[in-house]
Amino acid sequence: MQKNHKPLPADIHQKVFRDWRYFLGFGFGSGLLPKIPGTWGSLVAIPLIVLFKLFPVWLYIVLTIAYFFLGAWLSEKLSRDLDMHDYGGVNCDEILGMLCVMLPFSLNI
């Protein structure tokens, strides 16, 4: 597999918004945004963090662990489908990183 040297498939936008695996792997579509897909994924994580913070901490942890395993599987699958290793648009790992980092913090300003 190559690292980001191939062009994306012409139908990538359709795949992202029609296939749940691409939709989640591309950070709810944020991985298609230009220049800084990882940063866009981190920003997309903010509403998810706010939602998770409404649940008890044990549920936040369980959901984050589940997202870890789902994200690992999605990253591998999409890397193979796209024939690119660690394509930046597959930014579910940035979302997971934000979920982990924000776990000990409250929503208080």
Image: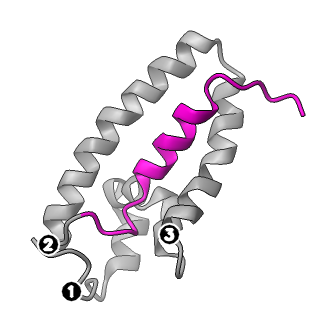
Residue at point 33%, 71% (across, down): 15
Whether residues under marks 3 and 1 lie with C-beta atoms below 8 angstroms apart, the answer is no
52 left or right of 7 in image: right
Q: Point out residue 67 in the picture as x, y percentages from the top left corner.
A: 40, 35
Can you say which quadrant of the picture contains the C terminus?
A: top right
Whether residues under marks 3 and 2 lie with C-beta atoms below 8 angstroms apart, the answer is no
Whether residue 60 is situated above or below residue 101 in the rendered picture: above
Whether residues under marks 2 and 1 lie with C-beta atoms below 8 angstroms apart, the answer is yes
* Mark 2 vs mark 1, CA separation in Å: 8 Å
* Mark 3 vs mark 2, CA separation in Å: 18 Å
Q: Which residue matches tag 1?
A: 6
Q: Which residue matches tag 3?
A: 37
| The one of 94 and 21 positioned closer to us in this rendering | 94
Q: Which residue matches tag 2?
A: 83
| N-term-proximal mark, 3 vs 1 | 1
Residue type at mark 3?
A: Pro
Can you say which quadrant of the picture contains the N terminus?
A: bottom left
